[in-house]
Image (spheres, rainbow, N blue to C red):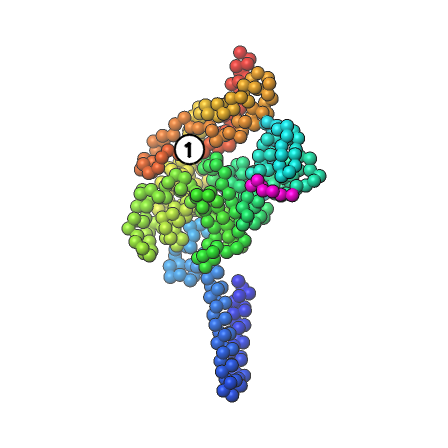
Amino acid sequence: MVFNVILSVWMSVKSILMSNNRDTSFLGRYLNWIQGTRMKILSIYLLSFFIFSQAAYADFWDWLTPTPNVPAHSVSDHQVQSASCLTERLTRYGKSDLFFQDYFDELKSGEKESSTYINGKTFKNQYKNMSDLYRLLTGYGNFRMDGSCEDIECEIYSLFGKTYAQKLTYIAKEFSFNASSLVNKKGSSFSESELDVIIWSFEQLPKFMFPPRMKKMVKDNHSYPGDLGLRIATMNINSGTMTFFKVWINSSLESKAYTIMHEFGHLIGAKLSIHESLAWIKLSNWDKIKGDQVNKADNLLSKYSRASHLEDFAESFAAYRMNARTLKSKAPKKFELIKEIAFLGKEYLNNDCGSSFVDEIFQLENLSSVEIEKTCEFQLLGYRLGLKDLGTAMGCLSNNGDKIKLNSFEPKSGVYRAKINENFKQVNYPFIPRDKQKQVSNNIIENLEMIERE
């Protein structure tokens, strides 16, 4: 960007200097005029390009627009760093390689396949979890395999690199997002530091928010084809794909994290049908906005939130987690709605971020294991009879954690909950956290072992 400014200034100066050294003949004056005009047009173009490209950044946009008291986005870089209840500072983030290694090693359990055929190569006696992981990260693509590898774990490492593969696995298993570049032909590989930002961002959200169905994250090195190429990211609800463009790639760590939070807000808004509900739309009078009118409601947090009721929700969602005090003071009804519906009562106004409501929901006695026990009936019976080992039974339970359900989900708190529920059919929300899935699985095994002892 700085280069564009220097170049445009140089072009302007050069055109001025040329005007003082002209051929006085008619043809000379004509050629000088043409050349000078070209230089000036090019200078204006380059300077305009600089201005519009910088408009993607909040500070410059605030300076350029007539309402500098309204920020471009609902969360600033400083607010990302200073938000309450962070697991750790973003700039200090970095789980150890040992953490990811231990996490990856947990997959090497459960059912084994005597023969696994992948990409023209047959592997013997491999864990089904590992072959499923390979197919997930490669999108069933036909890739040249490392001839020296004798197991699927080695093949995964040869494709992605050891630590990188383990981080991809962690994102997929913990948050149900596939960030592998091999699942999308247009995608580029995220850098390892970008994977760290993704992990950090998702770890700031309650685990019950993450849907069991796998979504995709795509990095596109090109600019968005529209909006002057200034769009940072998109969330395609139908395909379940979160795509990040060139502006995101060049932005700060904090801006990257805010964007992830914003786009995830679109997913939650759609999943729960909050952002299309009449209750949400009326909070900022979106139902009264016609055509190209700009919504100037006082409870809109940013310029971007004025784009539509959908962007309003995504901006408010990001603010609830990273700029909660501003959201509560400027849009208290939105704060309460998002708190009750999306975050199940969990607040981030200070570092006391507990929620008795959330704890109450996820008590073990409120979780139904009927469906998962039916799915793993064969493996559990085999373990009980001593025909299958514990790893096989636990592997089945681990792979089917999304089949654990809440016995009931009828919270009485929240003045908006009934209004929102009128607008969509019952969905499997909240999604059961991984640690609660493990508790249910352990409880099933303990009950089987107790029956055997009796």
> Please, what is the three-letter code of the amino acid marked with disc 1?
Asn
Note whether 280 is above or below 411 in the view shown.
Answer: below
Name the residue carrying label 1.
428
Q: Residue at x 51, y 85 (%)?
A: 27
Q: Position of residue 347 (x, y in %)?
A: 42, 39
Q: Is residue 92 left or right of residue 74?
A: right
Q: Residue furthest left?
A: 288
Q: Position of residue 168 (x, y in %)?
A: 57, 41
Q: Position of residue 450 (x, y in %)?
A: 53, 15
Note whether 25 is above or below 310 in the view shown.
Answer: below
- Location of residue 368 by image quarter: top left
Along the viewing direction, whichever of 431 and 79 lies nearer the viewer: 431
**Range of magenta residues:** 138-144
- Location of residue 349 by image quarter: top left
Q: Position of residue 75 (x, y in %)?
A: 44, 50
Main secondary-structure element of the magenta-colored stretch: loop
Note whether 238 is above or below 395 in the view shown.
Answer: below
